[in-house]
Amino acid sequence: MSDGLSPFQPDSAGRPMHSPLHFSPEAPAGQMLEDASEREGGLDRRRRERRGPGVPACDGSAAARGLFPREDAGVDAGVHLRRDPPVQLCAVDLKKNYQKGPVVIPVLRGVSLSVREGEMLAIVGKSGSGKSTLLHLLATLDAPDAGEIYFDGQRVDHLAGLERDALRNRYLGMIFQFYHLLPELTTLENVLMPLMIGENVWGYVRRRRQLRQTAAGLLEMVGLGHRLRHRPRELSGGEMQRAAIARALVGSPRILLADEPTGNLDFASGREILELLHRLNAERKLTIVMVTHDPSIAEQADRTIRLVEGQLEPGAGPARL
């Protein structure tokens, strides 16, 4: 960022400080962020103040740069348009290579997209097309070789390790095909893990009852209220994925990133997980970006983009801005 500051800069104790994105390590972990309408003016102003010259604007004005189609193109002057939800996540010209011995393997070859608040976006493509790599970059689990990623108009791909951890822990939820539950912990303890990581020791002890109630409430919501003390080996595949979804939601994230969330499940369990994701999207207005190889799953999303050999399929275009 042009002023050398980061919205996720940790303090001297290693804890992320308050930021323009309203990150507060002292706030209740289950508390939702302020309604977008309440913070829109101040956040937009801070975006403008922090953005240096030449930095792509991924908060609506990118249309002026020709990266994305204008939402008012072709509309007569004086016609009132419904404002689309703001862009939450934006990627510009992402490139990523992997090296296998002396051979450089290009995986992403310049991908640009944006995701609006409350949208469900599906990313599809054959195995090896780069869709999981793209999702990992959007989640800041990996860094692109070139290109930029913005969250709420602020660049995040170049953040330091502790800053990326703070971003993920507070704003991004992630679910994977293989669950990644810790086998020695109960279902409740697995869901609590992000809250334990996000709190200091005394903060967690002080708020332990409240945090456990938050985690138990989420497990009840996903249909696992009767499985709080069970360990992963005692759960079915569908139950483990439900526990993983509850864990991803426990910090009240702004965006849920799902990598083949039904890929390791039978048809019935996969359908239940999809119904749960649709309910979260509809009732909580949770933004969801989902990678899948299954066209029947992708067609249930609001919008689908297809990756072909590391590039957006011609005609698919970047997400509208």
Image (cartoon, rainbow, N blue to C red):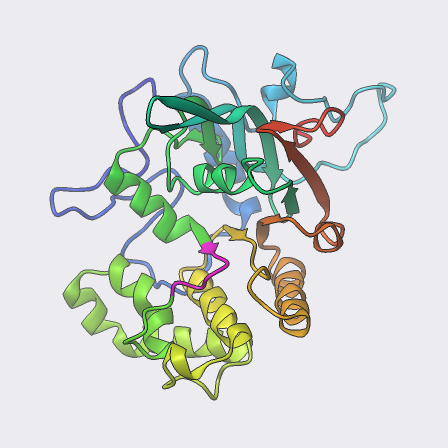
Residue 198: name its quadrant.
bottom left
Q: Is residue 176 magenta?
A: yes
Q: Residue at x 44, y 43 (%)?
A: 139
Measured as percent of width and height from the top left, residue 103 is found at: 39, 23
Q: Is residue 166 left or right of residue 45?
A: left
Q: Farthest left residue? A: 12
Query: Above or below — where is 298 with respect to 319?
Result: below
Q: Residue at x 44, y 61 (%)?
A: 248
Residue 277: name its quadrant.
bottom right
Q: Is residue 87 left or right of residue 4?
A: right
The C terminus: image quadrant: top right
Measured as percent of width and height from the top left, residue 171 is found at: 42, 49
Front residue of this view, candidates 225 and 18: 225
Q: Is residue 103 magenta?
A: no
Q: Is residue 231 left or right of residue 259?
A: left
Front residue of this view, candidates 106 and 82: 106
The N terminus: image quadrant: top left
Measured as percent of width and height from the top left, residue 317 is found at: 70, 26
Q: Residue at x 28, y 54 (%)?
A: 25
Q: Is residue 10 left or right of residue 250?
A: left
Query: Above or below — where is 65 with respect to 26?
Result: above
Prevailing secondary structure class for the magenta stretch in the rendered image: loop
Give the residues drawn in magenta, as a range.
Answer: 174-180
Front residue of this view, candidates 81 and 67: 67
Q: Residue at x 63, y 34 (%)?
A: 307
